[in-house]
Image (cartoon, rainbow, N blue to C red):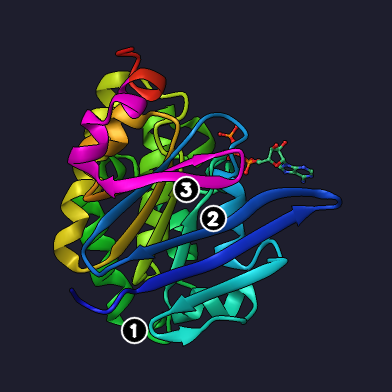
Amino acid sequence: MNAPILRVSDFCVDYGQVRALDGAALDVGPGRIVTVIGPNGAGKSTLLNAIMGVLPAAQGSVQFLGADERGTIEARVRRGMSLVPEKRELFATMTVEDNLRLGAWVRPDVREGGVQATQAEVFRLFPRLEERRRQLAGTLSGGERQMLAIGRALMARPKLLMLDEPSLGLAPLVVREIFRIISGLRDSGVGILLVEQNARAALQVADHGYVLETGRITLQGPAAELMHDPRVAATYLGLG
Ligand code: ATP
């Protein structure tokens, strides 16, 4: 197997006296989609925020591109980590195009043609965004907003793309469209860490999956196998 882009080991995060993440360990390889599924409050957002450096870890390590990662959020972004947060966090009063441009601020070629080329790639992935390039982000539909949030993250040309519940609040058809695009991103070699409550959609698109329950990884395996695991089927796919 290729060396992992991300390796998280023995990872613990506390909120005061409460341990929200307890000894999590996972790998994401290049061109792989790895999903973490689990119920509300399991610690999925906490995991992504701590990998990104938004939250401090109480214990454990994040190895990114083969080195121990202890940098600031900005340093992590510059090295190639990108997080699409659950709330999407777009600039509502700015246009689609300006939101995308902001995603490229970390790039050394921000004033050159490179950013333009990446924007063209993003528009190829999301033609809807090109149609709406001059529209204010605050007036987009939920699905379009999610597309813009992903597009903005891609503008930084990340090596690791972390997605926090991209399906949240979206109609099934829109979820399918977004997951189809996420699946296509594999070819670029980016490693994708996708956390989701929508276990079915996530396991369909992922190569490998982890189940997170009250801060602990309780099960893991190839996504196709997890999908047929009776415990996953009963608890997360409603097939019990
Ligand atoms: P959801 O799908 O509902 O977003 P999640 O799996 O992403 O859930 P987290 O948001 O990571 O879960 O929360 C994990 C646990 O940590 C929950 O019990 C939550 O209440 C708690 N928690 C999250 N943020 C804080 C905080 N800032 N202070 C205290 N406890 C928190």
Looking at the rendered structure, the secondary structure element under dot 2 is helix
Q: Earlier in the sequence, mark 1 or mark 3?
A: 3
The quadrant in which the C terminus is found is top left
Q: Vertical placement of 48 versus 114: above or below?
A: above
Looking at the rendered structure, the secondary structure element under dot 3 is loop
Within 8 Å: ligand 1 and the Cβ of disc 3?
A: no
Q: Quadrant of ligand 1?
A: top right
Q: Is residue 215 magenta?
A: yes
Q: Is residue 153 left or right of residue 214?
A: left
Q: Compare residues 152 and 218 and report the one nearer the observer.
A: 218
Q: Vertical placement of 85 versus 121: above or below?
A: above
Q: Earlier in the sequence, mark 2 or mark 1?
A: 2
Which amino acid type is marked by label 3? Thr
Q: Earlier in the sequence, mark 2 or mark 3?
A: 2
Q: Nearer the viewer, mark 2 or mark 3?
A: 2
Looking at the rendered structure, the secondary structure element under dot 1 is loop
Q: Residue at x 28, y 68 (%)?
A: 29
Which residue is tagged 1?
112
Q: Quadrant of residue 113?
A: bottom left
What segment carries the magenta color?
A: 209-233
Q: Quadrant of residue 198?
A: top left
In contact (CB < 8 Å): disc 2 and disc 3: no
Q: Compare residues 206 and 89 and report the one nearer the observer.
A: 206
